Image: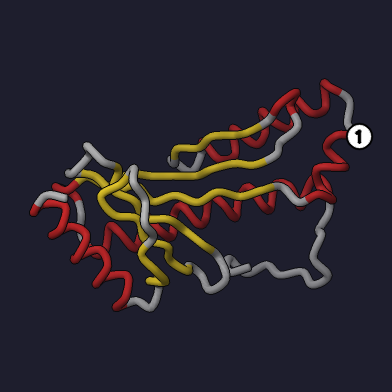
């Protein structure tokens, strides 16, 4: 890891710890550093600096669709599944984040939401704002699934911090 990467790593880790989000550093041969954070409590988000990208960090999280929702998606006809995938794409795209959907035969299995920050724009404010935006996009996806297929959880919450 270069001095620039060390400097970014130390800064980012301190800012995350100051806010109570930092959980752990993860060994990762594909990155200069990889942190796991809790935001909000109980939700995992990754902060990564990929190898070869010393001037950038990636904030991202992956979400798996619950078995109950998967079962309901599979019961839909092909046109309904395709329509749902398009609605899901439009919903996430409106939040100005990057995303990847795993949807063989238009059955949504999981999705990843991410955003990057480059060194010249890295500040504590930008980092925390980006963490919150990535979480909001994850939440948007969860709500879209719950709206269409019903809730799996017993208690309903309109809080952003599910």
Residue 92, placed above or below residue 127: above
Residue 10, placed above or below residue 46: below
- Report which quarter residue 20 is drawn in: bottom left
Instruction: Tell me the residue at 83%/70% (across/down).
Output: 154
Residue 148, placed above or below residue 39: above
Residue 102, percent from left and from top: 63, 33
In the depicted view, which residue is nearer to us: 76 or 86?
76
Residue 58, placed above or below residue 46: above
Instruction: Tell me the residue at 48%/43% (across/down).
Output: 95
Residue 133, percent from left and from top: 44, 54
Residue 53 located left or right of residue 91: left
- Report which quarter residue 151 is drawn in: bottom right
Residue 154 located left or right of residue 83: right
- Report which quarter residue 107 is drawn in: top right
Q: How many marks?
A: 1
Residue that mark 1 sits on: 75
Residue 40 located left or right of residue 19: right
Callout 1 environment at 10 Å: few (<14), some (14 to 19), or many (20+)?
A: few
Residue 26, percent from left and from top: 39, 60
Instruction: Tell me the residue at 8%/54% (across/down).
Output: 3
Residue 142, percent from left and from top: 67, 52
Q: Secondary structure at mark 1?
A: helix
Assign the C terminus to one quadrant of the image. bottom right
How is the protein colored in the picture? secondary structure
Instruction: Tell me the residue at 17%/48% (across/down).
Output: 119
In the depicted view, which residue is nearer to us: 161 or 106?
106
């Amino acid at each position: 890891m270069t001095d620039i990467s060390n400097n970014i790593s130390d800064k980012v880790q301190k800012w995350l710890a100051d806010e109570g989000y930092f959980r752990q550093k993860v060994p990762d041969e594909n990155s200069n550093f990889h942190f796991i954070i809790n935001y909000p409590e109980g939700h995992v988000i990754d902060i990564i600096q990929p190898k070869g990208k010393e001037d950038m960090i990636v904030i991202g999280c992956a979400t798996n669709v619950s078995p109950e929702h998967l079962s309901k998606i599979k019961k839909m006809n092909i046109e309904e599944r395709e329509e749902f995938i398009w609605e899901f794409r439009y919903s996430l795209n409106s939040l100005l984040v990057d995303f990847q959907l795993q949807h063989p035969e238009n059955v949504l299995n999981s999705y990843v939401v991410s955003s990057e920050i480059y060194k010249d724009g890295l500040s504590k404010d930008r980092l925390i704002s980006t963490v919150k935006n990535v979480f909001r996009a994850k939440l948007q996806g969860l709500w879209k699934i719950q709206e269409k297929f019903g809730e799996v959880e017993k208690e309903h919450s309109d809080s952003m911090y599910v």
